[in-house]
Each structure stands twice: as C-alpha cells, then as structure tokens.
Image (cartoon, rainbow, N blue to C red):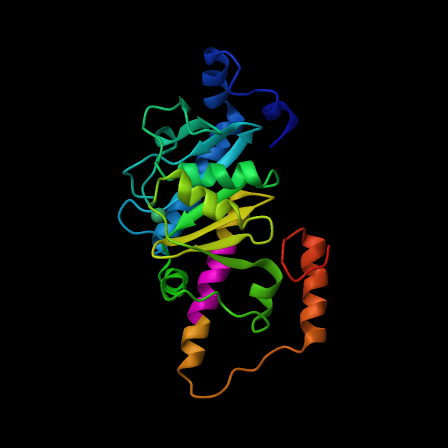
Amino acid sequence: MTDALAEISSKSPRVEIEKFFNGPEVTRCKQQICDVGRRMWQRAYVDGNGGNLAIRVASDLVLCTPTLVSKGFMKPEDLCLVDLNGAQMAGDQRRTSEILMHLEIMKRQPRAVATVHGHPPYGTAYGLAGIVPPTGRISEYELFVSTALAPYRTPGTPDLGHEVAALVDRHNTILMANHGVVAWSHSSLEDAYFKLEILEAYCQTLCIAAQLGRPLSEMSPAQVKDLLAIKARFGIPDPRMSG
Ligand SMILES: [Zn+2]
C-alpha cells in the first residue's frame, strides 16, 4: 500500500472511489489476484468456485474476488472493492461471502496487507484430522510459516472470521477445521500465497514421510532457535518467540 493509496477511504466520494478502483495501482492489484488465483487452481488448491483472495489497497478498502467464479479463470473486471465491514464499494460482480473472514483478519492484524484462502488437499486434511503440523522438521516451513487450527464455523459467517482472527497475532496460516486454509502476509499477495504453498508442501511431505516406516529426524533446540532468530528478522509471527 503506497501513501497515495492510503489517502482514499470508504468515506471518499463514490466518484473518487470508482476512479481509484479503475486506476493503475488497483489495476495492478487486480492482475496480481488473477495471476495468483490461476496458480492456485493449477496446483489444485481450489475446487469448484472455492477459495478467495484479498489485498488491502487503502486503510479501509479491500480488493477481493467475486462469488461463484473459479479462481483459475478470473478476469480483472470480475474483482470487487469492499470496505472493512464487507459493504461493496465498487465492481460489477458480487463480492465473495467469505470476505468477512479475510476482513476480520485485516481488522485484527493491521500488518495484514493480503490474504489467500483455498482448500489445498493436504493442509485441509490436517485440519480435518484436527492436527496442527509439528514444528522442528523442515527448515522452509520453520522459517516462513506458523500454523494454528480454528474450530469449524459456517463459511461466510462473522463467527468464522472471529475464530480465525483470534489466532492471527501469533500465526500467519490458519487451518480451518472441516473447511480449508487461510494465510495472511505483511508484505504482498504473492507472499501470502507462498505461506499456503509452503504449508501444503510440508503437509504432503509429512504424509509421505510417515509411510516410510522410520522415525522422522528432528532438529535440535539450538537449530530451531537459529531459524526462529531469522524468522523474527523477517517479521513473521511465531508463538515460540519471546515478547
Ligand atoms: Zn472456503
């Protein structure tokens, strides 16, 4: 979010919001959402019309995906602009009902500039089994992701948003029981997508490793501590960090 973008808000005149929505900065964000959506669909992280993506483009304005559209085939003109309460401010298509969950994350976590939600099979399976993946196994996951499990709530309800938002101060990737996964980033949409991708690869690796018939090797506490120090420098939350 640039300073220029931050000047506009949901209280700005409608004509200004419309101009902003069709301007070059938001157009670039629309293209990013279409690009990441296509990558999610290609990797089977979304099924049917499932999954949704959002970018905070001003302090209380969020660009998001529409309802009932495959994330693999979105066009920039399909995207919607909403305020932090989910009221639609611009866009011809109706915004996704699941935006409420993304908005609760953004309200709770002011650093969250982008959110990505999908139903990737391995991450979703962990949520289904009620298992938070163990830590101290794979360095990539250890460095970039911190996962928690939110209880099942009906998709599209504020209740689901509240359950997820309660976890985002200390975690950047949330497994939603009986549903899917959502990740937030303090830097970009692509970074939020990377959290989802890293979690999914990690859950898949754990499933494969569990079939090999040998105990899994674990990092030592000192090795984990080294990675957590780097993670802190990246600005990524983790409940194991002090303070
Ligand atoms: Zn979903």
What residue is at 49 percent from the left and 38 percent from the top? 104
Q: Is residue 11 above or below residue 60?
A: above
Q: Main secondary structure of the magenta part?
A: helix
**Quick check: 21 left or right of 2?**
left
Whether the magenta-drawn stretch holds residue 92 is answered as no
Residues in magenta, as a range: 195-204
Q: Nearer the viewer, residue 104 or 52?
A: 104
What residue is at 44 percent from the left and 27 percent from the top? 82
Tell me which corner region of the image, top left, top right, bottom left or bottom right, holds residue 241.
Answer: bottom right
* Residue 218 location (% of width, % of height): 59, 79
> Residue 35, can we see it?
no
What residue is at 46 percent from the left and 29 percent from the top? 85
Quadrant of the drawing holding the N terminus: top right
Q: Nearer the viewer, residue 176 or 220?
A: 176
* Residue 181 location (% of width, % of height): 42, 54
**Number of labelled discs?**
0
**Quick check: 174 left or right of 169?**
left
What residue is at 48 percent from the left and 36 percent from the top? 103
Whether the magenta-drawn stretch holds residue 199 is answered as yes
> Residue 177, can we see it?
yes
